[in-house]
Image (cartoon, rainbow, N blue to C red):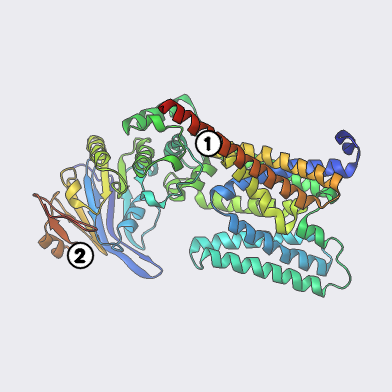
Amino acid sequence: MSKPIISLHKVAASYSGNPVLKNVSLDILQQDFIGIIGPNGGGKTTLLKIILGLLKPNEGSVTRNIGKHDIGYLPQVNQFDDHFPITVTDVVLSGLSTGMNIKPKRNPASVAKVEHVLDSVSMTAFSQRPIGELSGGELQRTMLARAIISSPKLLILDEPNTYVDNRFEQELYKILVELNKNIAILLVTHDVGTISPYIKSIACVNGGLHYHPSNEISNEQLKVYNCPIELVTHGPVPHRVMGQHKQK
Amino acid sequence: MELIHLFEYEFFRNAFSAAFLMSVSCGLIGTYIVARRMVFISGGITHASFGGVGISYFFGWPPMAGAAVFALIAAITTENLTRKKLIRNDSLIAVMWSLGMAIGIIFIYLTPGYSPNLMSFLFGSIITVTKVDLTLMLALTIIVSLVFILFYRIILFVSFDEQFAQTRGIPVMLVNYLLIVLVALTIVLSIRVAGIILVLSLLTIPQNTANLFTSNFGKILFWSVIIGFFGAFLGLTASYYLDIPSGATIIFSLVIIYITGRVIKLAIKKNNRKIQDRNLT
């Protein structure tokens, strides 16, 4: 077995004295594709922040066998001010920044990288467009381009299927599967069913973390994992739903 | 009198230089403020600085120094407490805003005799700008310009998405504190131009005018400086010929430029729609 790129050992975290995560251990391997599920407030975002290095755990240890800049991150799209005066190209360029380094300048290498990555998410035509003029799906593609432009070894995506249409959602998963040949992916989702064919394992996060080494999960298993998520079954794969849902 | 003759007067040359310098500082800092939706925070810092003016009058210190100290305390406190989420941002700003004004009013009331320059602090008086003021404005303009030239992309990335910037190893806190300090200092020195009551317009109207025509952060920076300077020069000249207060006239000029921009934008939109309709038929 290859060495984990990131390893969490008995990690605990709390906000203002309230425990959010306890005794969390997880090894992320080079070509992992883990779907992270769990109820709201269960600690999914806290877990991502710890892995990203944005939050220090109160207990336990995090071992990184990759550089700090080897992680690509796609946050939830609703956290942006979509009236902020910035173009698609500038957003994507920000994915190449490292520390107080004044680069990335608009040097030919950076520009070529931006063009290539925008092409891979079908956003070339929008390169000079301010983000305020993009649809939710286009903004999501832009953010994905920003997350992958630095050729990360681990890609973390927080609900990437929000605001995207069905067509792009399928395109997105295809891109992720392609990327997964070389990099590890962590994907937070509210819809296990849709991503089930693409992921390799599931992590249920609800105060703790239960690793499930398969891409499918049942209600019984969720109960065992203390992960209060309702699964509605249609088709071969059970999945969690957020709103009104039609049984097929 | 011809416009060029106005430059024979030292007070006008000083006022012109002040208008130029503050257009640069306010153009750059104002773009940051507007893009990050920090206008209300800036209002809080501006009004908090009045506390320093009042205390300085009472003790006989230079009012601008007192204003600077109060503005810096307000700016750093706001940044610090907002970051720690100890108090709601808008409530904190309201407290700073009113506390600063209250302290100022009390100390000015307690100061014996007449406070000769009080009105110029409230409403601005660019024509009373001294050589010392100009030197301070020049120093600030150089610092602000250098920060924006050297760290343009860092400022842009942090302003747009702090959390992502942090994942890229950018020292977000340092950038934020540096910029909030520059915001406070720009506000204090701009008080000489437009006064505590009106200074916020120097930091917002040119940016909103530029934003009518572009949504590119860099272009807004550039055009805010140009529009700010044009408005300040127009207002300064008009105030001389019409013999009305300079600060208010500068703001009035900026508003007229903004309205003109809106009308032009509307005309461009209408014209584009006409062309589109013609192409469809």
Element under label 1?
A: helix
The x, y position of residue A98, in whole percent, is: 46, 40
Outermost residue, top side: A108
Q: Position of residue B269 (x, y in %)?
A: 52, 36
Give amino acid for label 2: Pro
| Residue B143 shows up from this direction | no
Q: In terms of depth relative to the viewer, which is nearer, B196 or B137?
A: B196
Residue A200 visible at all: yes
Q: Which residue is mark 2?
A: A228
Q: Are marks 2 and 1 in contact (CB under 8 Å)?
A: no
Chain ID at mark 2: A
Residue B209 location, quadrant: top right
Amino acid type of the residue tagged 1 in the rendering: Lys
Front residue of this view, candidates B77 and A11: B77
Count of numbered tags:
2
The chain containing the residue under callout 1 comes to B
Furthest residue in direction left, as rendered: A236
Q: Residues within 10 Å of mark 2 (few under 14, many from 20)?
A: some
Tell me which residue sits at (68%, 37%) in the image.
B226
Task: State the mark number for residue A93.
Answer: none
Whether labels 2 and 1 belong to a single chain: the reply is no
Q: Which residue is mark 1?
A: B269
**SS of the residue at dot 2?**
loop
Vertically, is A98 above or below A221?
A: above
Report how far apart the C-alphas of labels 2 and 1 lie in the structure.
52 Å
Q: Please, is residue A195 above or below residue B119 in the view?
A: above
Left/right placement of residue B69 relative to residue A56 reads right
